[in-house]
Amino acid sequence: MIQADTSRAMQMALDAADEAARQGEVPVGAVVLDAAGDVVSVARNRVEELYDASAHAELLAMRAAAVKLGSPRLTGCTLVVTLEPCPMCAGAIVHFRCERVVFGAYDPKGGGVEHGPRVFERPTCLHRPEVIGGLREREAALQLRTFFQRLRKG
């Protein structure tokens, strides 16, 4: 069941990332699923729109899910995101207590899960979610490459 739910959620996240790109944002989308695999929230990057460097898709999706669920902890929830979370988002994932993180493209330069500080592996990490990387990796990476190629040409 988790595989089918995360596959559906990744498509929703990729669609949200497409919308982000159309709005001039870095194409990242995120979805939060509850323990039953139902969609709780969907978000896209809104950094430029909101003039907020912290308005990453993951943070916006987790904040919306917390409000909807009426709890600051997303116990039993899965965060599905098109790009490996950065260190800021990985830290937030710890505090929101997401059970699982599923991401598409790896981010060797800015990632904080499989790259960089590897937040969840730190001895002082308060919560260690299950991590599944590389779901629809090629498609998610292509979205990002295409966006930045167009930006450079523009």
Image (cartoon, grey):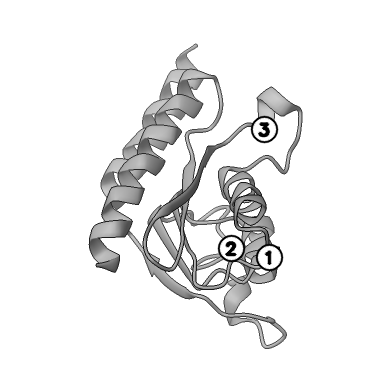
Between 65 and 45, the residue placed more toward the observer is 65
Residue type pointed to by label 1: Gly
Q: Which residue is mark 3?
A: 47
Report if the CB atoms under discs 3 and 2 are less than 8 Å apart.
no
Relative horizontal placement of residue 71, taking residue 24 as reference (left or right): right
User: SS class of the residue under badge 3?
Assistant: helix
User: Percent x, y for residue 46?
Assistant: 62, 31
Residue drawn where x is 38% and y is 68% of the image? 132
User: SS class of the residue under badge 1?
Assistant: helix
* Distance from the alpha carbon under mark 1 to that under mark 2: 9 Å
Q: Nearer the viewer, mark 1 or mark 2?
A: 1
Q: What numbered label is drawn on residue 112?
A: 2
Residue drawn where x is 63% and y is 44% of the image? 60
* Distance from the alpha carbon under mark 3 to that under mark 2: 19 Å
Relative horizontal placement of residue 109, taking residue 9 as reference (left or right): right
Between 33 and 11, the residue placed more toward the observer is 33
Q: Quadrant of residue 57?
A: top right
User: Percent x, y for residue 138?
Assistant: 27, 47
Quarter occupied by the N terminus: bottom left
Residue type pointed to by label 3: Val
Q: Earlier in the sequence, mark 1 or mark 2?
A: 1
Q: Which residue is mark 1?
A: 91
Q: Earlier in the sequence, mark 3 or mark 2?
A: 3
Relative horizontal placement of residue 81, taking residue 118 as reference (left or right): left
**Pointer 1 local density, CA inside 10 Å: few below 14, some 14–19, many at least 20:** some
